[in-house]
Image (tube, grey):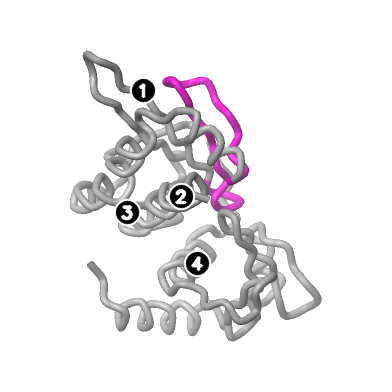
Amino acid sequence: MARIDDYKAACKIAREQLALIPYDEIVRRSGFKGIGDDRFQVPFLDRTYIVTHPNFLFRDETESEKEIPLQEQVLILHYIQGTGGKKTTRKWIAYREISGASFYFAAFVKRAIDPLKQVFGENIDGFTRAADRLGGTAVEAGDAAFEFSVFPHVPTQLILHAGDEEFPPEANILFDDSIGTILSPEDVAWLAGMVVYRLMALARS
């Protein structure tokens, strides 16, 4: 698992590289909403962040003193670096199909797949309620499935097959097949886990 120092270093590198890109280009390529000429709005799951340009500092829109997790900052910065205005294809792939993902597959399962099926596999109603609160759009798959626009060019689908007396619950997470050109396999694993854990938190509240 990455250390805090690793996240700080990743933020520093990303900020230095993104600072060289004009503000208008950052807004265009990311799909985020520009505010004035030096800030943009980043909806992320059930939070909204305001990010400054060119120093790329984060603050929570509604709780200005709230600390933004470094993992989330890194993920957002990497998304901006990688997206380049790419459009989604609406062709869905599993995590294993992302180039280079095999090395991180065990971490992906531990962070996202296992918690999803363990918490919601026998609680489909709870999954549905939490997904609705997180802005998910229902799709036809499994016993319950929702699509989330985590970033403007990164749709993600979470699919649950409920357990019964014969079979244990199963879960799957699908990504637009453009994701491998936007985020690294490690970032994709973190992204999926963040969605699942936010759903878990909403289900408890």
Circle 3 or circle 2, nearest the eye: 2
| Numbered circle sitting on residue 185 | 3
Q: Nearer the viewer, residue 205 or 71?
A: 205
Q: Identify the residue under disc 1.
A: 162
| Numbered circle sitting on residue 81 | 4
Circle 1 or circle 4, nearest the eye: 1
Q: Callout 4, which amino acid?
A: Gln
Q: Callout 1: helix, strand or loop?
A: loop
Q: Position of residue 76 (x, y in %)?
A: 51, 65
Q: Position of residue 139 (x, y in %)?
A: 55, 26
Identified at 56% across, 59% down, the residue is: 84
First in sequence: mark 1 or mark 4?
Answer: 4
Q: Are marks 3 and 4 in contact (CB under 8 Å)?
A: no
Report how far apart the C-alphas of labels 3 and 2 lie in the structure.
Answer: 16 Å
Report how far apart the C-alphas of labels 3 and 4 lie in the structure.
Answer: 15 Å
Identified at 58% across, 82% down, the residue is: 57
How many neighbours does mark 1 have within 10 angstroms: few (below 14), some (14-19), or many (20 or more)? some
Q: Callout 2, which amino acid?
A: Val
Report how far apart the C-alphas of labels 3 and 1 lie in the structure.
Answer: 27 Å
| Numbered circle sitting on residue 96 | none
First in sequence: mark 3 or mark 2?
Answer: 3
| Numbered circle sitting on residue 195 | 2
Classify 201 as above or below 137.
below
How many neighbours does mark 2 have within 10 angstroms: few (below 14), some (14-19), or many (20 or more)? many
Q: Position of residue 50 (x, y in %)?
A: 66, 73
Q: Position of residue 197 (x, y in %)?
A: 41, 52
The residues colored magenta run 134-154
Of all residues shown, which one is farthest toward the top?
Answer: 166
